[in-house]
Amino acid sequence: MDVDQVDVDKIAETIARALVKRTVLPPYEELSHLHKMLLEHVKTLMPLAEKQIDRLNRGTVAWYEKRSRLNTIPHEMAQGLGSGLKSADWHVRSMGYTCQFLLDNAGLARERDR
């Protein structure tokens, strides 16, 4: 997907929904829907973030930290929500942080600041 086709506002809204502080856990179906949206955003942002991170000087601490984080994302995506509300909420929150990392490193900040 091209940078111009990414709906940064929609992604940011989904991230905000995933990271909101909850006093009561939402229904599993709502978490499942949010999880599906986050997975789609990860699939959109991952190649863009990889491209930006691979432009960093290899061997630097910044490159290593970001590259290591990228390498964990496919494993996180494969985990699924789990069977309970607490595990589903935890996983959605974790995916929200992952999407935020990808958004921050996808080279879209300049597009968002216009």
Image: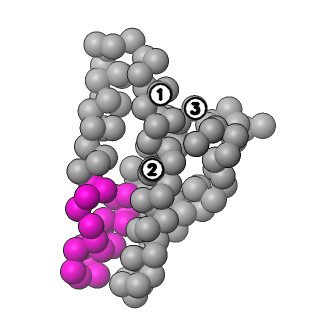
What's the distance in space between the residues labelled 3 and 2, CA to CA? 15 Å
Q: Is residue 99 visible?
A: no
Location of residue 84 with respect to 38 vertically, above or below: below
Q: Residue type at mark 3?
A: Gly
Q: Which residue is mark 3?
A: 107
Q: Which of the 4 quarters of the picture holds residue 101?
A: top left
In the rendered image, residue 73, in percent from the top left (x then y), is placed at 31, 46
**Membership of 97 in magenta stretch:** no
* Label 1 or label 2, whichever comes before in sequence order: 2
Q: Which residue is mark 1?
A: 51
Question: Where in the figure is residue 13, as x and y percent of width and height?
Answer: 60, 62
Q: Are marks 3 and 1 in contact (CB under 8 Å)?
A: yes
Closer to the chain start, of discs 3 and 1, is 1
Using the image as rendered, state which of residue 100 and residue 20 is in the foreground: 100
Region rendered in magenta: 76-95
- What residue appears at the point 62 percent right and 38 percent down from the top-left corner? 2
Q: Secondary structure at mark 1?
A: helix
The image quadrant that residue 23 belongs to is: bottom left
Front one among 51 and 16: 51
Give the residue pinned by disc 2: 43
Whether residue 94 is in magenta: the answer is yes
Q: Which of pointers 3 and 1 indicates the residue nearer the eye?
A: 1
Looking at the rendered structure, the kind of residue marked 2 is Lys
